[in-house]
Amino acid sequence: MTELKATIKRLATGVPGLDEVLGGGLPEFSFNLIAGPPGSGKTTLAHQIMFALATRERPALYFTVLGEPPLKMLRYQQQFAFFDTELVNAAIRFVNLADDTVTGDLDRVLGRIVAEVKAYGPAVVFVDSFRSVMLAGQLEGEPYMGLQHFIQQLGMLMTSWQATSFLIGEYLDKIDSNPVFTVADGLIWLRQSQQSNSVVRKMEIMKMRGQRTLPGLHTFRISSAGIQVFAPLPDLAMAAAPETPPIKGRLRMGVPELDQMMDGGLPRGYSLLVAGPSGSGKSILAAAFLMEGARSGETGVIAAFEQRSSVARGRGLAELIDAGHIGMIDTRAPDLSVDEIARLLITEIHRLKASRVVIDSLSGFELALAPTFRDDFRESLARLVWSLAATGAAVLMTSELEDRYTDLRFSPYGTAFMTDAIIVQRYIELDSRLRRILAVVKLRASAHSNELRLFHIDDHGIRIGEMVPGLEGLLGGQPRREQSNNGSSDSDDDG
């Protein structure tokens, strides 16, 4: 005899990234709790979900038990893009329970909720703030039992009404003995932390019956559009680096001599690190890479973290950005996380079908992060690089280096092992003048040049000149190893 399984429909929340974290959306007819400290975004999250789910055929009820009237709350919620005035009173009804709650009579509160639900027949129900109901229940002689009975009755009624319900509550700590945590099918916990001048908001799905959610803390941001959750990238940092992708064509760099040194250019899907000291031409090379793509009919994406990035402010590139041929990620938002930047980049890559990506620079990237995200920057960067490469786009990153002349370090983050190619730019003193030199240190599966070449920068960009004899030891001999942060060496089989 074949055993039949119940099919649970999952509802789209309308919150970017949240459905992915939930494992496909919210289970229909589930009984959920949205909890967290004051100001963490609970009410905004509830409203955003409500406006996404409510229709005239499937209306929503929003019970408020706050001391302030619903009109005051709505005045602030109207500032968000998800707020639809036409749905209010047509598909969404707000009911103020303040007068019923202040008496401390939970039976009266439950009776009012039941009456409104029977009269309105909602598909989605919210009670905000449920913490106020709990505090009101403590006025009774046996607060715990009274509250437990109230929650059990409410939970059973919500299930019998076939409504997807949400209880919003202010909690500073997780209290496992609280009956609401036991009865709820789903528990979404919001939190916010402050470090220095940074405030970071995170979300944890502590419980969601019947489906596999993404574990851990997930960064989210509140903007004029509402809440956006940044689901984590695949956890590749602790695994072995992915195999070198097969070469399926090469991208020209915008500097013909450099294409020759790179055996025809940068292979599609490769990641390239351009390392060098300040003023050596890293950003100019990055701009040439993007502009060469535009000349070939390809689109690109840039995340510029330097305030005066030559990539972002170049006249030709700015015109391409304005024309929509190159997408630019907004890196000015405070308290950034690597997951947030990664999601923005990947979204823009898919939108533009971009084949080229630039991150300028890694040092500016790290400084733009909230302090709490800097401790594991290297691991997060590895996930970022490999996730971007998985889109099929070629990734160029710049890295600021102190030029120590004989100390071979490609970046302070130990990124050599995670990239497919490395170009290093250096300064030398030649004939009483400071000159620039360039070398292709690494390019997997390619017969790249090992020459040290002089180059200069003019109004037309980078111009690579002749090889400089007698400088074989400048890059520390055979460029096959790099010094990592902890003093150990990372092996480099660049082919």
Image: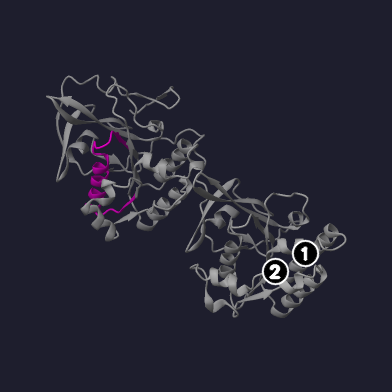
In the picture, which quadrant includes the C terminus?
Answer: top left
User: At 25% from the left edge and 55% from the top edge, which residue is drawn?
Assistant: 318
Q: Which residue matches tag 1?
A: 136
Instruction: Estimate the x, y position of residue 431 in percent, counting from the top left.
Output: 11, 24
Q: Mark 2: which amino acid?
A: Val
Q: Number of numbered discs present?
A: 2
Which residues fall within the magenta stretch? Answer: 273-302
Q: Position of residue 121 (x, y in %)?
A: 69, 77
Please tell me which residue is depicted at 66% across the width and 56% down the height of the picture: 35
Depth check, front residue: 464 or 68: 68
State the separation of the CA atoms marked 2 and 1: 10 Å
Q: Give above or below for 121 relative to 21.
A: below
* Residue at the disc numbered 2: 65
Nearer-N-terminus badge (2/1): 2
Q: Would residue 25 be counted in the magenta stretch?
A: no
Counting from the top left corner in percent of width and height, residue 221 is at 51, 55
C-beta proximity under 8 Å, tags 2 and 1: yes
**Residue 471 appears left or right of 37:** left
286 within the magenta span: yes
**Quadrant of the rendered structure where residue 453 is?**
top left
Name, please, the residue furthest toward the right.
Answer: 141
Examine the rendered structure and indicate whether residue 121 appears above or below residue 158: below
Quadrant of the image for the N terminus?
A: bottom right
Kind of residue sitting beneath label 1: Ala
Q: Nearer the viewer, residue 8 or 142?
A: 142
Helix, strand or loop at label 1? It is helix
> Would you call the spot at circle 1 few (<14 residues within 10 Å), some (14-19), or many (20 or more)?
many
The answer to whether residue 54 shows anywhere in this view is no
